Amino acid sequence: MTAERLMDYKLVRQCAPTLAARKVGSLFCMENIQGGREPMCSLLARWNHDLNPSGVFVRIVAERCGRSFIYVYRRNLLSRLFETAEVRHFLKQYDYKHFDEERLILNLTHRIGRCRCFPHEIGLFLGYPLEDVKGFIINAGKNSKSTGYWKVYGDVEKSERIFECFRKCFSVMSSLFERGYSLPMLAVS
């Protein structure tokens, strides 16, 4: 497998539900590419070129200790999520004042930069239910009803169905990629 294809495979393995339009966004970490910032920027530019026509966008939201934290998201799903009054009200507690995509992500990036760990509202950017994000904060990550791709404090049955869907996405997308499918072929429009 070429180096380029290996990078693409990492994205597929980490972001399959987002590529399949089943999840708002995914976050994963990559060691910075040798040669400094330019190779990483080139990689992200290629990914955006390949994925933007399907509504998938890729950005770096943090850089720490020689690693880049890459946020892969579906613009339409992100916009729809942050249109809801309940989500906006929740985010205003964390100094989010503007709800267009660019400023939301810039605010998140700024908050990540100010925290030793990731701010808990990042769960919304990853498509976790608001009830579960609030539950995680209130309970300091303890006392969840269930744990899968996130800690569940609300509707366990619904979350378990979502977890199963995600598992299928990872399996199917990885299999298709291994059979030669490209990123643009995998990204559901």
Image: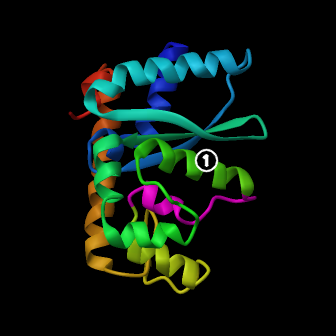
Task: Tell me residue 172's x, y (percent).
Answer: 27, 40
**Magenta segment:** 115-127
Task: Tell me residue 61's x, y (percent).
Answer: 59, 42
Q: Nearer the viewer, residue 165 or 42?
A: 42
> Most prominent secondary structure in the magenta stretch?
loop
On the image, numbered disc 1 is attached to which residue? 109
Task: Tell me residue 81's x, y (percent).
Answer: 32, 58
Q: Is residue 10 left or right of residue 170?
A: right
- Which secondary structure lies at badge 1? helix
Give me the residue at 55% from left, 72% from top: 93
Mark 1, other Cα within 10 Å: few <14 / some 14–19 / many ≥20:
some
For residue 7, above or below residue 120: above
Three-letter amino acid code of the residue under disc 1:
Thr
Q: Nearer the viewer, residue 30 or 126?
A: 126
Q: Is residue 8 left or right of residue 81?
A: right
In the displayed image of the protein, which residue is found farthest to the left? 189
- Residue 7 in view here: yes
Question: Residue 105: within the magenta?
Answer: no
- Residue 129 in view here: no
Residue 188, quarter of picture:
top left
Question: Residue 123: within the magenta?
Answer: yes
